[in-house]
Image: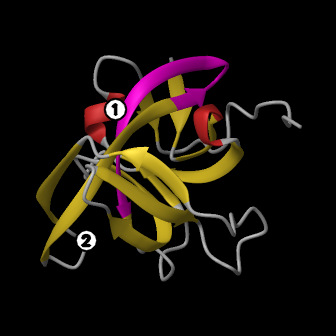
Amino acid sequence: MIIGRTEYVSLPELNFFNIDAKIDTGAYNSSIHCEDIHLDDDNTVRFKLLDELHPDYCKQHIKMPVYKIKNVRSSNGKIQERIFIKTIIELSGRQYEAELSLTDRKDMKYPMLIGRKFLQGRFIVDVSLQYQHIEDEKV
């Protein structure tokens, strides 16, 4: 399946739909913009998805199991310890299990980044295209 350099993706398990995502073959991991990230003693993480300036901001903490914690080199070259969750990403009407790192992306243009670990074997990225797969708005 061919996708563009930006696409709308949904996170149905978290009730977030049509999130603006940058498709980035230079990034290995996928990530989502979060605020107020707290690691709990029971191997769960609480976070607020997106931020107050985003129209779909979630004011309530979302609580999910921690999939893993690992060091990630960010776009500025610095190593950061990040918490990962596993959830479903929906793109073009199809659902895929994915690992997402929770991070502050407020200074980035797109609240979500889809990396090559998710893309590999599933998609071909045509950088001349954008928003090839717009989903119907979920209510």
Of residues 110 and 55, the one drawn nearer to the viewer in this rendering: 55
Secondary element at image label 2: loop
Q: Residue 75 location in percent, x, y?
A: 25, 71
Name the residue type under label 2: Ser
Q: Is residue 117 above or below residue 20?
A: above
State the residue at coordinates (26%, 47%): 29
Left of 34 or right of it: where is 45? left
Q: Is residue 97 above or below residue 71?
A: above
Name the residue type under label 1: Phe
Left of 50 or right of it: where is 123? left
Q: Residues within 10 Å of mark 1 (few under 14, many from 20)?
A: many
Q: Residue furthest front?
A: 42
Of residues 78 and 102, the one drawn nearer to the viewer in this rendering: 102
**Number of marks:** 2
The residue under label 2 is 75
- Characterize the magenta stretch by its predominant secondary structure: strand
* Segment tinted magenta in the rendering: 89-102
State the residue at coordinates (13%, 78%): 78
The residue under label 1 is 118
Q: Residue 57 location in percent, x, y?
A: 70, 67
Which disc is residue 52 wearing?
none
Secondary element at image label 1: helix
Location of residue 105 (image quadrant): bottom left
State the residue at coordinates (60%, 33%): 13
Q: Residues within 10 Å of mark 2 (few under 14, many from 20)?
A: few
On-image quarter of the C terminus: top right
